[in-house]
Image: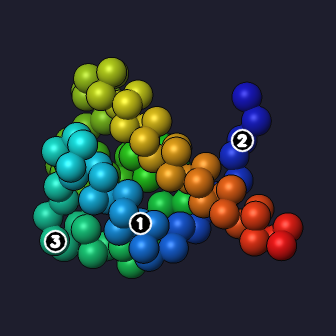
Amino acid sequence: MSRRPEITLSQPEVRALLDELCRTYGFCLPPQNDARIMASPPTTVDAFIHEVFLAEGLDIEMADRHLVRQMRGSISAFFARHEDIVTFRRAT
């Protein structure tokens, strides 16, 4: 599998992603951890999901695999939308 490039999500994208993870999966981060991720968002899907689990005080290795796959899918979709937007803007 090819390695996906690092992507820097915009502040509104990070906010929307964290809000979705809260609403959909109940991962509503404590304010200080939320602010830390907003200030320096992880640039890969794997780094983002690991950071969210860490911010919740959870070990991703001990988490339900189905939940991790679902969350990874949601995060991956945000990263893919970002790539689509960037590609579209470059083409216009």
Image coordinates for residue 39, horizontal then vertical, percent: 39, 78
Mark earlier in primary sequence (1, 3):
1
Q: Which residue is mark 3?
A: 31
Total marks in image: 3
Q: Mark on residue 55?
A: none
Badge 3 crowding class, 10 Å Cα cut-off, few under 14, some 14 to 19, many 20 or more, is: few
Mark earlier in primary sequence (2, 1):
2
The Cα–Cα distance between marks 1 and 3, rounded to whole angstroms, is 14 Å
Q: Residue furthest right?
A: 91
The Cα–Cα distance between marks 2 and 3, rounded to whole angstroms, is 32 Å
Q: Quadrant of the C terminus?
A: bottom right
Q: Is residue 80 left or right of residue 28?
A: right
Q: Between residue 32 and residue 27, name the one nearer to us.
A: 27
Q: Residue at x 85, y 67 (%)?
A: 91
Q: Nearer the viewer, mark 1 or mark 3?
A: 1
Looking at the picture, which amino acid does disc 3 mark?
Pro
Looking at the picture, which amino acid does disc 1 mark?
Val
Q: Is residue 44 left or right of residue 4?
A: left
Whether 79 is drawn above or below 68: the answer is: below
Badge 2 crowding class, 10 Å Cα cut-off, few under 14, some 14 to 19, many 20 or more, is: few
Mark earlier in primary sequence (2, 3):
2
Q: Which residue is mark 2?
A: 3
Whether 66 is drawn above or below 18: the answer is: above
Q: Which residue is mark 1?
A: 14
Q: Is residue 60 left or right of residue 5?
A: left
Q: Nearer the viewer, mark 2 or mark 1?
A: 1
Q: In the picture, residue 74 is in which quadrant?
A: top left
Can residue 47 be seen here? no
The Cα–Cα distance between marks 2 and 1, rounded to whole angstroms, is 21 Å
